[in-house]
Amino acid sequence: MATRKLVQPAAKGPDPVLERLRALCLSLPETSETVTWGHPNFRVKKKIFAAYDNYGDGPAIGLKATMD
């Protein structure tokens, strides 16, 4: 089993990857951002469709690939 290494965001300013993801996700209708499990998640109503975290040496984005 792989060990997950969390990387703390740099204190030098906003993360440009997260800012771009946020802009894209929040431009969609009925989308909101919540912090769940310690990182930003983007939802339509109560369904998460995108998540952002720092993993290994950099940013990681998870996207839902199936339709509900």
Image (cartoon, helix red, strand yellow):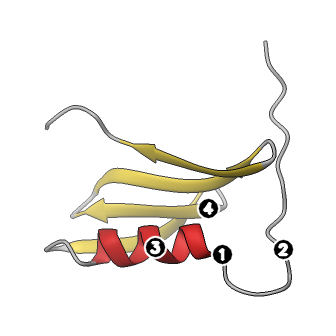
Marks counted in the figure total: 4
For marks 3 and 4, give the CA distance: 15 Å
The earlier-in-sequence mark between 1 and 2 is: 2
Side of 59 where 45 appears, left or right: left
Q: Is residue 57 above or below residue 18?
A: above
The earlier-in-sequence mark between 3 and 1 is: 1
Q: Which residue is located at x 51 percent, y 77 percent?
A: 19
Q: Nearer the viewer, residue 63 or 42?
A: 63
The earlier-in-sequence mark between 2 and 4 is: 2
**Marks 3, 4: nearer the viewer:** 3
Q: Are marks 2 and 4 in contact (CB under 8 Å)?
A: no
Q: Amino acid at mark 3?
A: Arg
Instruction: Return the x and y of residue 22 as percentages of the image width and height.
Output: 43, 74
Q: Which residue is located at x 63 percent, y 55 percent?
A: 53
For marks 2 and 4, give the CA distance: 15 Å
User: Which of the image's four quarters has the N terminus?
Assistant: top right
Look at mark 1 in the image and give the residue it sits on.
15
Q: Secondary structure at mark 3?
A: helix
Q: Amino acid at mark 2?
A: Ala
Side of 3 where 14 appears, left or right: left
Q: Residues within 10 Å of mark 2 (few under 14, many from 20)?
A: few
Q: Secondary structure at mark 4?
A: strand
For marks 1 and 2, give the CA distance: 8 Å
Instruction: Return the x and y of residue 45 as percentages of the image width and height.
Output: 21, 64
The earlier-in-sequence mark between 3 and 4 is: 3
Look at mark 2 in the image and give the residue it sits on.
10
Q: Which residue is located at x 44 percent, y 67 percent?
A: 21
Instruction: Return the x and y of residue 29 as percentages of the image width and height.
Output: 13, 74
For marks 4 and 1, give the CA distance: 13 Å
